[in-house]
Amino acid sequence: MTTLAPTPGVLWRRTRGPVVAVAVVLLGALALAILAGGRGSGRLDPRSPEPSGSRAVAEVLRDQGVEVVLVTTTAGVRGSASAGDTVLVVDPALLADEQVDAVRATGADLVVVAPAAPERFVATVTAGPGSAPGLRRPGCDLGAARRAGAAEVGGQGFEVASGTDALRCYARDGRPSLVRVPEGGRAVTLVGSATALTNADLGDEGNAALALGLLGENPRLVWYLPSLADVPAGAQQTSFYSLVPDGVWWALVQLTVAVLLVALWRARRLGPVVAEPLPVVVRASETVEGRARLYRWAGARDTAAEALRAAVRSRTVPALGLPARSAPGAVVDAVAGRTRRPAPDVAALLYGSAPADDAALVRLADDLDALEREVRRP
């Protein structure tokens, strides 16, 4: 049994189907994950009735007489918010520094949801280790938190600088997940998780009371939904990679491993040749023809040419009285002396490059046959 190492072209033909299929699945999964994590999902949108939306809390606020104004641009915030209002920022990671300054310049009370860099809104508060949202007791004197009691809070934790006049609520391991800091006649509230604002969780425990207490303190609420399209030209924008959820990267790693395993499976080699007793006697001509067909199928003209040259050398070297492992130069000189051919021509026949096409391979076979006859001629 004879095996041939597959060429790159053969490997590609074997693996392109599975690779293309997995690539399509990979791109589809990435697109769905990005779309699901983007604004199209209605996350914290006061118009959205989806589980991740916030239509329920917006409607209850309106029923209580609070004017809820939805804005999606920094210009909208400037034109809608002023001192005595509340501005809710639900996706602060999308804001450039210029936009944060614009929000702060309104003079309105701020409620910022899950800020990864809280120091952009309050200089004395930094991000601490986070934790999964869960039921917690307020443990502070904030009116909205005391009225709500236990609520599902958590997510981003906060570190408050010592000496800061701040209310620290819903703490775990000494790190609050809700902080209120008075600043220049207005209050800035940082909330570690958006759980209490979503339609799906608003009715659980004290979530509704906490959400209404934080957002309904003033008669007007400006609900700010930032978007990537609103980032000022030239501003330092958040990296695309930081916006992709961590689960997407794990999915990419798993799919990459799957692609490599499929490629290895489809491109596996048969390994070394194993000698086995033939169940029937095969004629030598059929064996030669079968091997030739394998060479042709694989496009291995270089291997076929070297097989022809090696066979001629193995038969002519003993006829010239040379050792079996003679150097190529000695073989060329001996054959040139016997046949009276130029040494470069002999070297090209016995040790030359691979034929460029099948016709050149046939000519090489004929030339080698003629050369062998001349060497054996008495």
Image: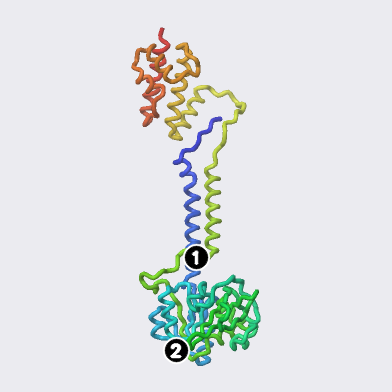
Task: Please identify the quadrant where the N terminus is shown.
Answer: top right
Secondary structure of residue under mark 2:
loop
Horizontally, residue 77 falls left or right of residue 193, namely left
Q: Which residue is mark 2?
A: 83
Who comes first in sequence, dot 1 or dot 2?
2
Give the percent coordinates (x, y) of residue 98.
40, 75
* Front-lying residue, 46 or 99: 99
Name, please, the residue furthest toward the left: 342
* Front-lying residue, 25 or 146: 146
Horizontally, residue 293 falls left or right of residue 203, namely left
Identify the mark at residue 244; answer none if there is no mark.
1
Secondary structure of residue under mark 1:
loop
Pair 1/2: label in front: 2
Going by the numbered disc 1, the residue's amino acid type is Val
123, above or below 344, in the image: below
Give the percent coordinates (x, y) of residue 146.
63, 87
Identify the mark at residue 301; answer none if there is no mark.
none
Q: How far apart, in angstroms, are the residues tagged by discs 1 and 2?
A: 35 Å
Task: Please identify the quadrant where the C terminus is shown.
Answer: top left
Dot 1 and dot 2 residues touching (CB under 8 Å): no
Residue drawn at 48 percent across, 86 percent down: 184
132, above or below 78, in the image: above
Answer with the quarter of the image where residue 141 lies: bottom right
Give the percent coordinates (x, y) of residue 14.
49, 44
Q: How is the image coloured?
A: rainbow
Answer with the quarter of the image where residue 173 lies: bottom right
Give the percent coordinates (x, y) of residue 265.
55, 45
Going by the numbered disc 2, the residue's amino acid type is Ala
Name, please, the residue furthest toward the top: 378
Residue drawn at 48 percent across, 55 percent down: 23
